[in-house]
């Protein structure tokens, strides 16, 4: 299991190639990469603030629950902070398991929890100088309910 | 003495990322009441508790949680990771 919180960019292709490499017990690998999106065509940059210490702890707890619930063979989470340009990757998750259903579900679970339970906050800076904290969505909170057992 | 930390717009409204606070508050809610009474910038930051989350020693908690033994209290808006 790997959790990395970093300012630097990363290469999703290289990360995915290295993930689960050389393991014959895996039947499925699923990955997701989140990108800085510029809906209105006016975004200059996104700055991601986080809570050093709690961030790593919170993500590790989320990963541990996913690994346990879906008996994952391996799991990778990379999440960036700092200043990011439109089109840059923000984060990535990868899950490895024997079967695809577990890998897909665990990746969705990780994404749902990272969205609402990992201490990151996004601020958008537009080219005209305006700034706006990205608000959490009710949908994101609702998404967690489907995982309660 | 507790270390109180603020993130995102809570940090911006209060104007600093962290401070040490001498308090006899027994719960998070009591600490919030003390902070609100300090200065208008605190009152503004803590105006609507439904818009805030709190972590005690880096674990999410409720506003009625006890502060006994807690070293680090963090206030922030709902998280927007991913």
Image (cartoon, rainbow, N blue to C red):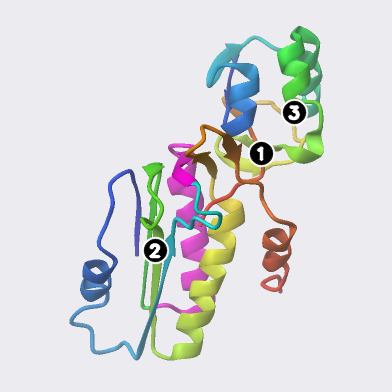
- Specify the subunit that label 3 lies on: B
User: Crowding at label 2, few (<14), some or many (≥20) Cα neighbours within 10 Å?
Assistant: many
Residue at the spot 59% in from the left edge and 23% down from the top edge: B12
Answer yes or no: are tags 1 and 2 on the same subunit: no
Q: In the rendered structure, are the residues bearing label 1 and label 2 in contact, judged by CB atoms less than 8 Å apart?
A: no
- The residue tagged with tag 3: helix, strand or loop? helix
Q: Is residue B72 visible?
A: yes
**Is A131 contained in the magenta span?**
no
Q: Quadrant of residue A40?
A: bottom right
Q: Secondary structure at mark 2?
A: strand
> Residue at the spot x=62%, y=34% of the render?
B56
* Real-space Cα separation, disc 1 to disc 2, in angstroms: 23 Å
Both marks 3 and 2 on one chain:
no
Res B77 label: 1
Q: Is A19 positioned to the left or the right of B44 in the image?
A: left
Q: Nearer the viewer, mark 3 or mark 1?
A: 1
CA separation in Å, label 3 and label 2: 34 Å
For the record, the magenta segment spans: A43-72
Q: Quadrant of residue A105?
A: bottom right
Front residue (pair A93, B59): A93
Q: Is residue B42 left or right of residue A117?
A: right
Q: Where in the figure is residue A95, as x and y percent of width and height?
A: 40, 75
Query: In which quadrant is the N terminus of chain B drawn?
Result: top right
């Amino acid at each position: 299991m790997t959790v990395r919180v970093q300012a630097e960019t990363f290469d999703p292709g290289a990360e995915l190639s290295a993930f689960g490499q050389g393991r014959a017990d895996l039947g499925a690998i699923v990955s997701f990469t989140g990108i800085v999106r510029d809906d209105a065509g006016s975004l200059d940059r996104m700055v991601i603030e986080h809570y050093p210490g709690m961030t790593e702890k919170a993500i590790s707890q989320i990963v541990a629950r996913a690994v346990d619930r879906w008996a994952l063979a391996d799991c990778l989470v990379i999440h960036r902070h700092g200043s990011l340009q439109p089109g840059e990757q923000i984060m990535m998750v990868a899950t490895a398991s024997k079967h695809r259903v577990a890998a897909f579900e665990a990746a969705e679970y990780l994404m749902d929890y990272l969205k609402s339970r990992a201490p990151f906050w996004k601020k958008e800076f537009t080219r005209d100088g305006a700034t706006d904290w990205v608000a959490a969505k009710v949908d994101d909170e609702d998404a967690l309910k489907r995982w309660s057992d | 003495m507790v270390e109180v930390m603020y993130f995102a717009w809570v940090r911006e409204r209060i104007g600093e990322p962290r401070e040490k606070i001498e308090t006899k508050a027994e719960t998070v809610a009591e600490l919030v009441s003390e902070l609100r009474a300090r200065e208008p910038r605190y009152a503004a930051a803590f105006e609507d508790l439904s818009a805030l989350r709190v972590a005690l020693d880096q674990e999410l908690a409720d506003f009625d949680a006890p502060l006994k033994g807690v070293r680090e209290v963090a206030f922030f808006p709902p998280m927007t990771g991913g």
